[in-house]
Image: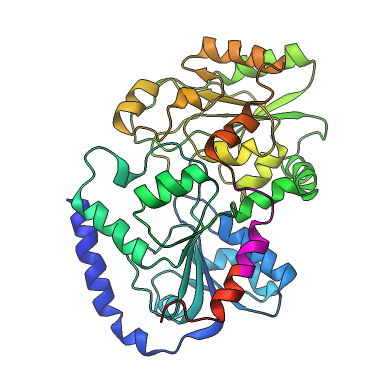
Amino acid sequence: MKYYVKYILQKLIALCLLPFRLLPIRQNRILFLSLEGGSAWEYSCNPRAFCEYLLAEAPDEYEIVWLFREPEKYAFLHKKGIRTARHFTLQGIAYALTSRIVVTNGGYLTWFPFRRGQLCINTWHGGGAYKRLENDMAGANRATRKRMEYSARHTTAFVSTCEAFSRLVIRDGFLYKGEILPIGMPRNDIFFSPACEERSRSVREELGLPASCRLALYAPTFRPAGTRKEALPAEALLDYLMKQTSEDWRLLYRAHIQAEDAADPAGRDSRILDVTSYPETQSLLCAADLLITDYSSILWDYTLTDRPVLLFTPDLEDYTAKRGFYYDIRDWGFPLCQNSSELLTALEETLTGAHRDASAHHRALLGSYETGHACEELLRYLRQASSSSIRS
């Protein structure tokens, strides 16, 4: 029922916003939107990465605007010449309907009545092809499909990370038939840059950690409340890492932006740090020496570091039945651990280099497009598109 209510609201919103469509579109205005939720930073993800590239490489080319839930939290952007406004205010709506270019990682596209003459770029907020999208799940209803069709009609171009994402997610899941940009995600350019090492040092400094300490990052995906089966054995994992490597280890825990069911690691050891509110995930990935996740697309980003990955999936059977995957998780190429014992065994194998080439094989399986030039390619596309009438 909630999906049909959303569909009806979408139509009502479009009707109410008709007067704003009389405002002229500003040809040099670019609007950035990032998914909101929980206490997460909205100045983040692919929109942030591309915005910062523009500030560095084309500082006078665009009037840059960001919409936020709490714009006062991002007042520091004003010093960079960026305008900010609040979601769903008259000012925010006016910006949304008068920007020639809209760069989003998914927000607004399923309901907002963007205009002909606007270039709407969907960078999405995840790479690879892992858990199925809502429209691809068993029992997806007509209203869900309608929202995907609406989003597809209002998208000018869709950024893709790999061949599997283009084919299975963009074409099938989003029902999108328009232009795909096979350039990788802007936020992943960092992994091809010397700046990644600097980010790694900065994370340790900001968290008050020794420069020499090693970091394991635990970043599980979203789960509905009451569905978690087993907590990560954090203390045992850290003890094992320290014993086997004779090095100082910490565990960073980052919950999903919309998590309803806390995945807190077992134990309250001082070596366990909650970094859920840390502003930018990519910096944490630059700093991490090991990633432990499950079905999260954070996996895709981290494969670009070629560092070890473990999949901790105690609820695999239930998750497969209720959500499902585009590729069998056993084909992803990473150690699959369904309980604590299997996790420690896989950790031992990983430390001996048993899965050294897993990330490279995984990228080949999905047909990676990542080269470290996504921002450059996206700017080139926008310059060409802005000089033509794509939406005539």
Q: 43 or 209, which lies in front?
A: 43
Q: The magenta stretch spans which residues?
A: 369-380
Q: Position of residue 108 (x, y in %)?
A: 39, 64
Q: What's the coloring here?
A: rainbow
Above or below residue 284? Residue 338 is: above
Figure label count: 0
Dividing the picture into quadrants, the one containing residue 309 is top right
Q: Position of residue 182 (x, y in %)?
A: 56, 54
Residue depicted at x 30% and y 47%? 135
Dividing the picture into quadrants, the one containing residue 168 is top left
Residue depicted at x 48% and y 42%? 164
Dividing the picture into quadrants, the one containing residue 154 is bottom left
Q: Does 353 sit left or right of 86 as displayed? A: right
Q: Is residue 109 on the magenta stretch?
A: no
> Is residue 293 in view from this perspective?
yes
Q: 344 or 210, which lies in front?
A: 344
Q: 38 or 198, which lies in front?
A: 198
> Is residue 29 in view from this perspective?
no
Q: Does 276 sit left or right of 209 as displayed? A: left
Q: 288 or 185, which lies in front?
A: 185
Q: Does 194 sit left or right of 274 as displayed? A: right
Locate the C terminus by quadrant: bottom left
Q: Does 129 sit left or right of 148 as displayed? A: right
Q: Position of residue 11 (x, y in %)?
A: 23, 70
Q: Position of residue 25 (x, y in %)?
A: 47, 85
